[in-house]
């Protein structure tokens, strides 16, 4: 059982204000949990508290059924892969991988075997006697991985391990890490500020903002069912469009739910056409401001009397068109209150201006 | 300078002609000529002159220098006093460097943290570095005075008898080493602290996750990472110590009983007090050889074991 729990954990550096405020987080045994959030939101801090590199100001951290607040980093059964790898520059690749094992007083013969096995797995056998400085970024990354793996930890933690690699290598390492997780079945905690990494790797995403958890759920759940405006805007490329409700009321009718303040919809859920559609939904006459064609898809920035927003379309780009109609299906609308929290409604929370539309919806 | 200037003018005025190409080829040499000339006149020429003199007998005044072949060297190397001088120099160098670096290393590890007290101590130990050697020598002559010195007074408070710091042949060299170490540690500490602070913090974090004990953290991470700084300090420490002169010439004049006479002071004594120029030059040549060998050893042997990022 290596479930990890943070109970009412707060952290302040020195006397400055809290970086993490009363965080409650549970990381499932064997999960690939990704902590994601903008720069400075406290991802590394959270990770480092779990690893024991940073003390908690208050609260409890549990690994399995052990309270680890007072347990030394090396005794928590955790291996960490650092963003800059943190390889020991004075040791060879072999020395780096072996160092932790030597500290654990594992006999030499056994050590040698373990190192060679790991080197085989991460494909480093021919580099064992080189120094990290003489390796490429991807190779160093693999040394860091090997060093973490060889200790057979209960939990792996990764702090933006791929951010120093080029795009191609990053994609490759991403796949390798997913496979590694499948094979080992141990708990992975992974920090990134790249939402693509978060979506593609994690089986659970924890979205952080200013030291608070905004949402914790499976990637597709976060995408389809964001709990608040922050999560909605953070996941998805491009971000969800969020417009003040007042500007939309003209087009869809008066709100019946007083809590609602903003309405959001994803760019890929809006339909863009040259003529007004009869399908049910919010109809907005718009003007195309800019257009980015990306091959399979086209990204439009459009202006309407409800405000500016983006539309992603998988149809052929609309060349030489200025005036368009955008339709947003009713069931793709998300409502948020003044705090940015999601408002869940039964049915649609507005009066019908146009009786005809209403009939269509209800059919 | 003139030459360099004219070549430049030639090139500009005659454009692409062959002659200017030839001058262009020479221009770099002309530009470095002043530096080379200074180097030759003030560094290389004296060395050759010294080597030349070492084969002659000369008293500094008489116009003739008598060629004596290797005799100066033969006399020198069979002179027990000279052998003692060599021994003194090596002892002095070895212990000064060893103690300076060891103490500075310990001080650095202690001082490498935040707080006004640590900054204050660091400043205090550094101050001897900026005091002139002559003042240091005078100061320590008083501190180490057997009858009226501070050191013996302090020792008397804890019931230790007078120590003849500078007048007892078995102790005087050690006293000079103490003075040198006292002067060195401030600067050495500064260099080592800078070295410590340039060790990335994440290495220690990785080590903590690797369950590294305190001792292994020092021997496997801190010390190897410091080796460039320590290597640098060893080099300048040895070169400085071998050439020690001021403190000896002011405090002990090589005495008592030749026990603190070192190579450079010996050369000075023979050359400018006894006016045995040829003899002093021969000792100078030996100093040159020793320094040359040491330099070779550093770069061949030591540099291989030094970690450079
Ligand atoms: N050692 C420290 N001393 C003081 N403040 C710190 C320290 N480390 C981090 N902070 C502060 O804590 C906050 C959270 O930092 P943290 O490193 O956890 O962010 P992060 O989410 O990992 O960001 P990034 O994506 O840029 O790595 C930041 O505002 C940062 O300024
Ligand atoms: Mg970080």
Image: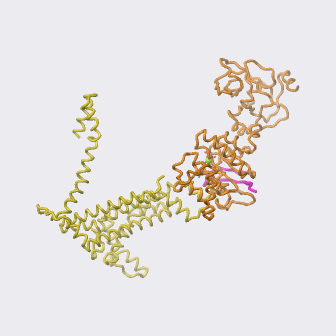
Residue B84's place in the image compared with A45, above or below, is below
Rendered shade, chain A: orange
Residue B284 % position (x, y): 25, 63
Rendered-image quadrant of the N terminus of chain A: bottom right
Rendered-image quadrant of the C terminus of chain A: top right
Towards the viewer: B39 or B29: B29
Kindly indicate which chain is depicted in yellow in the rendered structure.
Answer: B
Q: Residue at x 42, y 59 (%)?
A: B302
Left or right: residue A338 compared with residue B95: right
Find the magenta span and give its range: A1-24
Question: Seen from this angle, which residue lies furthest left?
Answer: B63
Residue B194's place in the image compared with A274, above or below, is below
Left or right: residue B300 compared with residue A264: left
Left or right: residue B10 compared with residue A99: left
Residue A66 figure quarter: bottom right
Residue A65 % position (x, y): 75, 59
Residue A172 % position (x, y): 63, 41
């Amino acid at each position: 059982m290596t479930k990890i729990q943070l109970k009412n954990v707060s952290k302040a550096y020195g006397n400055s204000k809290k970086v993490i405020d009363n965080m409650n987080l549970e990381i499932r045994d064997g999960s690939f949990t990704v902590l994601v959030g903008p720069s400075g939101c406290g991802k590394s801090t959270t990770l480092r508290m779990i690893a024991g590199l940073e003390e908690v100001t208050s609260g409890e951290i549990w690994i399995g059924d052990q309270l680890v607040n007072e347990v030394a980093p090396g005794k928590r059964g955790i291996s960490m892969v650092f963003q800059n790898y943190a390889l020991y520059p004075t040791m060879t690749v072999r020395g780096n991988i072996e160092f932790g094992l030597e500290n654990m007083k594992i006999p030499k013969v056994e050590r040698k075997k373990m190192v060679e096995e790991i080197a085989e797995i991460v494909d480093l056998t021919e580099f064992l006697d080189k120094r990290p400085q003489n390796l490429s970024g991807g190779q160093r990354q693999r040394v860091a991985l090997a060093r973490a793996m060889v200790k057979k930890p209960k939990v792996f933690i990764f702090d933006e391990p791929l951010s120093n690699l080029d795009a191609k290598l990053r994609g490759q390492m991403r796949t390798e890490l997913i496979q590694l997780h499948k094979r080992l079945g141990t708990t992975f905690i992974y920090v990134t500020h790249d939402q693509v990494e978060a979506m593609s790797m994690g089986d659970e995403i924890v979205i952080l903002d200013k030291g608070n958890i905004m949402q914790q759920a499976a990637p597709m759940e976060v995408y389809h069912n964001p709990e608040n405006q922050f999560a909605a805007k953070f996941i998805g490329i491009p971000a969800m469009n969020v417009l003040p409700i007042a500007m939309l009321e003209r087009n869809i009718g008066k709100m019946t739910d007083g809590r609602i303040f903003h309405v959001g919809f994803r760019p890929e859920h809006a339909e863009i056409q040259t003529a007004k559609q009869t399908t049910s939904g919010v109809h907005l006459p718009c003007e195309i401001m800019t257009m980015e064609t990306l091959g399979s898809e086209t990204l439009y920035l459009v202006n309407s009397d409800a405000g500016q927003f983006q539309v992603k379309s998988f149809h052929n780009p609309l060349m030489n068109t200025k005036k368009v109609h955008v339709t947003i299906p009713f069931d793709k609308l998300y409502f948020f209150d003044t705090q940015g929290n999601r408002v869940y409604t039964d049915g649609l929370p507005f009066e019908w201006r146009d009786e005809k539309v209403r009939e269509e919806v209800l059919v | 300078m003139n030459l360099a200037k004219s070549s430049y003018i030639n090139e500009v005025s005659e454009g692409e002609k062959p002659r200017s190409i030839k001058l262009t080829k020479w221009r770099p040499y002309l530009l470095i000529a002043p530096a080379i000339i200074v180097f030759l006149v003030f560094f290389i020429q004296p060395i050759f002159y010294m080597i030349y003199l070492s084969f002659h007998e000369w008293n500094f005044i008489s116009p003739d220098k008598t060629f004596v072949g290797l005799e100066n060297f033969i006399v020198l190397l069979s002179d027990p006093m000279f052998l003692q001088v060599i021994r003194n120099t090596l002892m002095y160098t070895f212990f000064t460097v060893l103690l300076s670096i060891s103490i500075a290393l310990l001080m650095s590890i202690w001082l490498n943290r935040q707080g006004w007290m640590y900054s204050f101590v660091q400043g205090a130990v550094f101050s001897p570095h900026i005091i002139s050697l002559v003042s240091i020598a005078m100061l320590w002559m008083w501190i180490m005075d057997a009858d009226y010195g501070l050191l013996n007074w302090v020792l008397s408070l804890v019931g230790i008898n007078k120590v003849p710091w500078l007048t007892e042949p078995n102790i005087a060299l050690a006293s000079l080493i103490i003075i040198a170490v006292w002067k060195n540690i401030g600067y050495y500490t500064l260099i080592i602290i800078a070295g410590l602070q340039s060790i990335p913090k994440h290495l220690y974090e990785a080590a903590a996750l690797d369950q590294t004990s305190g001792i292994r953290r020092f021997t496997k991470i801190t010390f190897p990472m410091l080796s460039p700084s320590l290597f640098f300090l060893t080099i300048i420490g040895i070169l400085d110590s071998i050439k020690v002169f001021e403190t000896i010439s002011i405090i002990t004049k090589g005495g008592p009983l030749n026990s603190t006479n070192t190579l450079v002071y010996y050369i000075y004594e023979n050359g400018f007090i006894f006016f045995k120029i040829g003899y002093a030059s021969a000792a100078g040549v030996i100093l040159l050889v020793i320094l040359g060998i040491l330099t070779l050893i550093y770069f061949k042997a030591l540099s291989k074991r030094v970690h450079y990022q």
